[in-house]
Amino acid sequence: MVDIDKSLLLQMVNFLFLLWILNIILYRPIRRILAERKQRVDGFLLDIKQLGQQIEDQKNEIADLTNLARKKGFEEKEALKQEAHKEQERLLAEINAQMEAKISDVKSNIAGDIMAARKTLQSQIDTFARELVTKILGRQIG
């Protein structure tokens, strides 16, 4: 059996003294270092979370700006298409007017040529008639 005597009491005091010394020399510094490390890691995690949120916000902002730019580009493209269509219609109307004027000029020239040809033929009708009668009858008419 174990006898409780002075040596046991001395061993207990020695053990408690050793725990106190180890606590001062070893355990407290280690716990302090671990606490500092935990604080740093927590700080880094918080920084990482904040940076991740900033990145997400910037991604959303970029997406919004991209969509806005696409929408604006599409609207400008449509406006340019409409403007080009109006310009095309204006040019076609101008060309049609020019063509109508040219056609009118050509028609008037043709009408003038027809009138001139009629006058020329009208003045030569007697000569043609006499030659025709001469050929049909085979003799000269006076």
Image (tube, grey):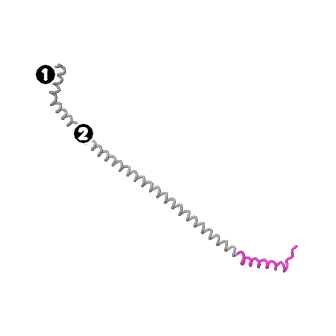
State the predominant SS element of the stretch in magenta: helix
Instruction: Please name the residue shown 36% across and 49% down the image.
Output: 84
In the image: residue 117, left or right of residue 19: left
Task: Judge from the rendering whether residue 136 lies leftward or rightward of residue 24; answer left or right.
Answer: left
Question: Which mark is on residue 106?
Answer: 2
Secondary structure under badge 1? loop
Indicate whether 71 appears above or below 136: below
- What residue appears at the point 17 percent right and 26 percent down from the top-left corner? 128
Q: The N terminus lies in which quarter of the figure?
A: bottom right
Quarter-wise, where is residue 99 in the image?
A: top left
Circle 2: residue type: Val
Residue segment shown in magenta:
1-27
Does 42 lie within the magenta span? no
Which residue is the site of mark 1? 141
Label 2 element class: helix
Res. 132 image quadrant: top left
- Residue sticking out furthest to the left: 142
Q: CA distance from mark 2 to mark 1?
A: 42 Å
The three-letter code of the residue at mark 1 reads: Ile
Label 2: how many Cα within 10 Å (few below 14, some 14–19, many 20+): few
Question: Horizontally, is 133 left or right of 82 in the view?
Answer: left
In this view of the protein, which residue sits in the foreground, 10 or 66?
66
Q: Could you tell me which residue is drawn at 67 percent across and 71 percent down? A: 34
Q: Which quadrant of the structure image shows residue 117?
A: top left
Residues under numbered marks 2 and 1 in contact, where contact means CB atoms less than 8 Å apart: no
- Mark 2 or 1, which is nearer the eye? 1
Where is residue 18 drawn, in percent x and y? 77, 78
39 lies above or below 14 = above
Image quarter where the C terminus lies is top left
